Image: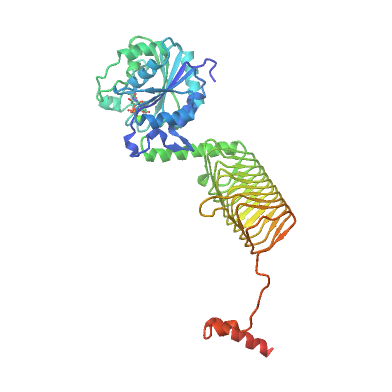
Amino acid sequence: MSDRRPTAVIVLAAGEGTRMKSTTPKVLHTIGGRSLVGHALRAARGVDPLHLAVVVRHERDRVAAHIAEHDEDALIVDQDEIKGTGRAVECALESLPGDLTGTILVTYGDVPLLTSQTLSRLCDVHDASADAVTMITASLDDPTGYGRIVRGPDGAVAAIVEQKDATEQQRAIHEVNSGIYAFDLEFLRGALAEVGTDNAQGEKYLTDVVGISTRRGLGVHAHLIDDLWQTEGVNDKVQLARLGAELNRRTVEQAMRDGAIVIDPATTWIDADVTIGPDTVIHPGTQIHGASTIGTECDIGPDTTLKDVEVGDAASVVRTHAELAVIGAGAKVGPFSYLRPGSNLGAQGKIGAFVETKNATIGTGAKVPHLTYCGDATIGAGANIGAGTIFANYDGVTKGHTNIGAGTFVGSNSVIVAPRHIGDGAYIAAGSAVIKDVEPGQLAVTRAAQQRNIDGWVARRFAGTKMADAARAATETKGDE
Ligand code: UD1
Ligand code: CA
């Protein structure tokens, strides 16, 4: 980190992004679980600027609301009808206090892989030189579309020329402007006032400031970086996927460096804000999204999707879909489990195959192992919920909550009609429809009092059918014995 705090970072996000062909503003599209502008804000905040301003115009209200959600201290600046990156920066300067001095950084809202480290390095390089402008440049095999870095006979930067304004000779230059700069603030304010709109696009170009600096002998430094991904912007959905894949590759690699074991990085998707403890194994086909945190020595996957899920140490989560759920230490989930928001499984607990849970707190060591819907319930420690139990939480109009006491046994294929209170250590007989509360230690059984077996009933009721034939064959064999 630079020891001098930058005075401000200005993030440009006013452009329309027409090539995205989307009803969602470009900078609100996400990669790695975070919007493009969210990535830009994160990188900007990382250098600890005194002021952080974001310039908006296209879909202004949606973009501004999103920015405020992400970073409540960011200053939202409206760009007026004058177009161009230079005008965008000028609008930001007009919104910031007029007496600011020091270093100002400019970045874009649609360049999501740029890191704080790179911005910090840019600050250091700028502070160490006496130049009025330091910009990040990159050398591209295909520089089409970018502003070219034109150097003088001595090799010093002379100007930036936009693709649309460039001569044939200038278009052959491979070194391009990334659009990320550090400026001396006083110089920038004065220089922008001199920039006009006499160019192919009729815009006020920020890049014209570079020519002004060299003409005045104030110096321009090009800081060439090798990691081209950090300068690449998103202009269409192909680039969105390309940068999304690269961000994921970086995130998965970091997770491994932090100690996770990723069996198949190619089919593993981890969002930027996820944390994973050491020696946790991530099996193929796993996606971990949002603000999920995974403990140490867990087994996650294969084919599992977790969004905003907290998983305790040594838990196992196999072929599961879970959202806004908590899975306790040493708990076992899956295969084929569906944990909806508000599911909270205690330590050493179990949610097994074909079980759906929602707004359900399942106590320490409690088990819901097979074929159950468990919604709006609190289940005590060590309880066992038999196969096929349904928590009937909805009567068609309102939802009700069910409490199951600690150590209670619910027999298979029971329906517990909410709202219901079942005491500790109670016993529900298999196949019961429980419509009354049960006290601690009681047996609840709602089946018909006895089972009747009526001889020859099938032969009489279904004479001539395959069923009747099978019954007769069985009776005859029995007679032969
Ligand atoms: C700009 C640079 C170019 C550089 C390229 C890198 C200029 C004149 N050119 O070109 O040298 O190689 O970026 O990607 O600066 N924006 C606003 N307000 C505006 C116009 C743009 O906020 O009026 C924002 C956009 O939302 C975007 C960024 O500025 O985030 C860049 O705008 P864009 O139109 O993509 O610039 P380029 O023409 O690509
Ligand atoms: Ca662009």
In the image: residue 184, left or right of residue 376: left
Asked if residue 383 can be seen in this view, the reply is yes
- Nearest the viewer among 39 and 481 is 481
Q: Find residue 135 and report its horizontal and vertical position in percent.
A: 41, 20
Query: Eyeballing the image, is 476 above or below 416?
Result: below
Q: Find residue 435 and report its horizontal and vertical position in percent.
A: 62, 58
Q: Residue at x 61, y 52 (%)?
A: 419
Query: Eyeballing the image, is 14 above or below 464?
Result: above
Q: Residue furthest front?
A: 436
Where residue 234 sits, quadrant-wise, is top left
Colouring of the image:
rainbow
Ligand 2's image quarter is: top left
Q: Residue at x 44, y 37 (%)?
A: 30
Q: Find residue 349 and report its horizontal and vertical position in percent.
A: 67, 49
Where residue 478 sits, quadrant-wise, is bottom right
Quadrant for the C terminus in the image: bottom right
Query: Eyeballing the image, is 354 above or below 312?
Result: below
